[in-house]
Amino acid sequence: MTGETAQFAKDILRQWVFVLAAAPILPGLAARTKSWFSGRKGPPVLQLYWDILKLFRKGTVYSRSTTSVLRAGPVISFSAAMAASLMIPFGGMEAPLTFQGDLILFAYLWGLSRFFTMTAALDTGSAFEGMGASREAIFSCLAEPALLLGFLALAREAGSLSMSDLLSVGLIRIWSIHAPALCLVAAAMAVVFLTENSRIPIDDPNTHLELTMIHEVMVLDHGGPDLALIEYASAVKFFVLGALLVRIVYPIRSGGFWDGGEVLLLGLAALAVLVGVVESTMARFRLSRIPQLLTLSFVLSGFGVILSLAAPR
């Protein structure tokens, strides 16, 4: 193994350890904030760690009518989330996996995860899970264009199609010159973040009514290690997409991995608390209004692209 290959493997391992160790804290912070607003003590911030460990110790039961698609869904969802985490520069350095055009791969890794989650839900033959899969497909068709248009606006300003360049220290200069365009992109990314993580006002992760669920209804037939992978993948998605939003809003200056990582963790903690505040102060939208909100995010990203194209270079 050459020195360059060894360093690449070391960077990947460091990034994955960072993500796996920190990701489950964020949903715990959001849940604790909601408990505080309702006057309850609530679960510990580290509760998700214990839930995942407990699920890994349990067995898994599969229906005779299901196929290997049900088993593949959680594994691919978790693998896609971990692969996407390699494209976000968490510290003040470049991401471990970076190349021109990696933003397209970043967006479609989430599409791959969503596809196998939906097919696993359809594989059960449950009408409720099929209903959740159809809703997920519709909303993702509206969220993905907003995400890609937001990337296009950032790429125009940064002059690169690499995630590391988009989220580099150069964003500080771009904010000082093209703040209106970046504000529109950040607002659109916030809506995409809530949609991809199935949070209020798009979806309620704590609901128990199958007729109103979107994400949770698709995983009703999963249990044991499969459900543990799904929960971990959801936490990683929260962490990675939250890191994307935090780095857009507050660019991290150049420095070492851990120097920038501390700033990023503080930003992610603030974002998790903000999610808890939003979920405590407003209700979920009616299903008929969610496409309108996602269309608004698409329009915001589109105007961000127009402003970036119209701005002098």
Image (spheres, grey):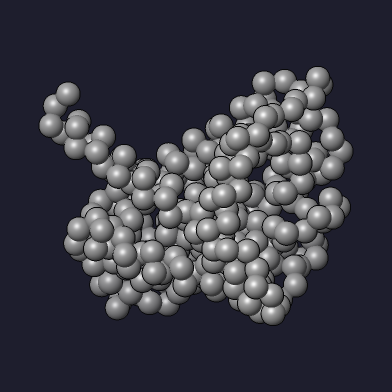
Q: Quadrant of residue 47?
A: bottom right
Residue found 20% across the figure and 58% down from its top: 256
Position in image of residue 268 (x %, y %): 44, 65
Q: Nearer the viewer, residue 96 or 21?
A: 21
Above or below 187: residue 129: above
Residue found 55% across the figure and 73% down from its top: 274
Is residue 292 visible in the rendered structure shown here?
no
Q: Nearer the viewer, residue 139 or 161?
A: 139
Q: Quadrant of residue 17?
A: top left
Residue found 19% across the figure and 37% down from its top: 7
Farthest residue to the left: give it: 3
Q: Quadrant of residue 159?
A: bottom left
Position in image of residue 74 (x %, y %): 60, 35
Above or below 23: residue 61: above
Q: Which quadrant would the N terminus be assigned to in this image? A: top left
**Left-right relation of 7 to 73:** left
**Left-right relation of 53 to 207:** left
Q: Nearer the viewer, residue 101 or 241?
A: 241
Position in image of residue 58 (x %, y %): 65, 34
Badge count: 0
Position in image of residue 80 (x %, y %): 49, 38
**Left-right relation of 225 to 124:** left
**Left-right relation of 28 to 171:** right
Residue found 72% across the figure and 20% down from its top: 67
Is residue 1 visible in the rendered structure shown here?
yes
Q: Which quadrant would the C terminus be assigned to in this image? A: bottom left
